[in-house]
Image: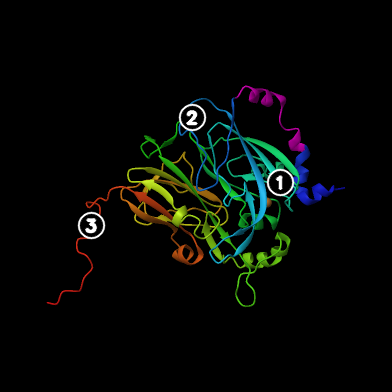
Amino acid sequence: MLTRRQALMGTAAAAMLPTLAKAAPPAAEAGMAGLPREKVTLVAPPFVHAHEQVASGGPKVVEFVLPIEEKPVVIDDEGTVLQGMTFNGSIPGPMMVVHEGDYVEVTLINSAANSMPHNIDFHAATGALGGGALTLIMPGEQVKLRFKATRSGTFVYHCAPEGPMIPWHVVSGMSGTLMVLPRDGLRNHRGEPLRYDQVFYVGENDFYIPRDADGNFKQYESHGDAYAETVEVMRGLVPTHVVFNGAKGALTGDNAMKAKVGETVLIVHSQANRDTRPHLIGGHGDYVWEEGKFANPPARDLETWFIRGGSAGAAVYTFLQPGIYAYVNHNLIEAVELGATAHFVVEGEWSDDLMKQVEAPGPIPMN
Ligand SMILES: [Cu+2]
C-alpha cells in the first residue's frame, strides 16, 4: 500500500528509504560533531561565493541552503518564456565550492508555492543516486543531505525526480556545479601550484520551446500546460535555444565578464544534458581539465575544449591582450543563432609583439 507521497516519489526511490534511513551508525554522527562548520551564502552565476583556494585548516562541514523556485523565465530578447525550474532562482543553479575531504551539507527547500516534487543528484557524491533517492521532496517540504566530497573536480548537480520528469526538469533549468578543490589548491602539469585571480561559472543550457502553427514560440500559463508539447520538442533532440546563464545575451553587453591583462581566470563550464565545445576567441585554455577532474594533469594550450553532457569542465587562462573576447560554444550555429555566446571585456595594455595590424585596410595596389 503506497502513500500519496510514495506514489509521487516513485516506488524505486521510496523502497530505498527504509534501508537508507537506518544506514548512518551513531559513531559516524559522533565523528561529525567535532568538525568545524561553515555556512556559505550562495551567489548567482557567473559569480562564485568567496572561498579559499588552498584550505587553511582540516576538513569541515560546509552548509548550503538551496531553495527551489519554479518560475517563468525570459530566455531571449524576443521575450520568449520558458516555464523555468531553478535552484536558488538562477539558471544555472549557483556554483558551490568546497575542498576534498569536506562534508557538503545541503538543505533543499521545495517551497509551497511550487507545483512539483524535486530532488538533487550530486555527481560528486557517492551512493543513493547521488543523493537523489534521499532528497525527493514535495512542495512545502525541505530535506537536509550530507555527503563527503571524496574526489576533487568540477561536478554537475541536477534535479532527477523520476522517469520523464528527469530530462524535463533538467532542460527547464535545474542544474548547477559543485567544485571540489584539492586541499592544497590547483596544480599544473608539473605539479606546481596554480592560482586564479577570478573565477567565473558559465552554465550552458539547451531549451526546447514549442512553436505555434505560424512558427512563433508558444507561451503557457503553467508548467503543467507546457509539459506535453515541450516533451514533443525534446524528443526531436533539436534545441530552440542554447544559452549561457539562462538566456541569450545573459553574459554580453553590460553583463559581460570583466578581467584585466595579466589576470588569471578560472572558467568553469557545465552542461547537464548535452555536449558542448567552449572556445575563447582570441585566447586559449592555458590549462584545461576537460573532464573537470583535478586528480588528472591539465591539458595545455587548447584552442577548443570538449565538455561532455552531464559534466563540468574547468579552464585556466591568463589574459595577455585587452579587448572584447567572445567566449562561445564553437558549434557556431549554436553560438550565433541559438544564443551560446558570452563576452569577456579585458582592460590593459596592447602588445604589438603578440599582434599588430602591419598595414591598415586599403585598396589593392595597382602595379
Ligand atoms: Cu525538479
Q: Please state if 25 lies on the left or on the right of 42 as rendered.
A: right
- Residue at (25, 50) in percent of width and height: 351
Please tell me which of labels 3 and 1 falls first in the chain: 1
**CA distance for labels 3 and 1:** 55 Å
Say which amino acid is labelled 1: Asn
Say which amino acid is labelled 3: Lys
| Quadrant of the image occupied by residue 66 | top right
In the image, 47 versus 24, the foreground residue is 47
In the image, 47 versus 307, the foreground residue is 47
In this view, the residue farthest toward the right is 1
| Residue designated by label 1 | 110
- Residue 349 percent location from the top left of the image: 28, 48
Callout 2 crowding tier (Cα within 10 Å): few <14, some 14–19, many ≥20: some
- Residue 271 percent location from the top left of the image: 54, 53
Q: Could you tell me what secondary structure mostly forms the magenta stretch? A: helix
Residue 251 in view here: yes
| Residue designated by label 2 | 55
| Residue designated by label 3 | 356
Say which amino acid is labelled 2: Ala
Q: Which residues are magenta?
A: 19-35
Please tell me which of labels 2 and 3 falls first in the chain: 2
Label 2 or label 3, whichever lies nearer to me, is 3
Vertically, is 51 above or below 240? Answer: above
**CA distance for labels 1 and 2:** 32 Å
Which label sits on residue 62? none
**CA distance for labels 2 and 3:** 43 Å
In the image, 158 versus 359, the foreground residue is 359
| Quadrant of the image occupied by residue 120 | top right
Disc 2, SS: loop
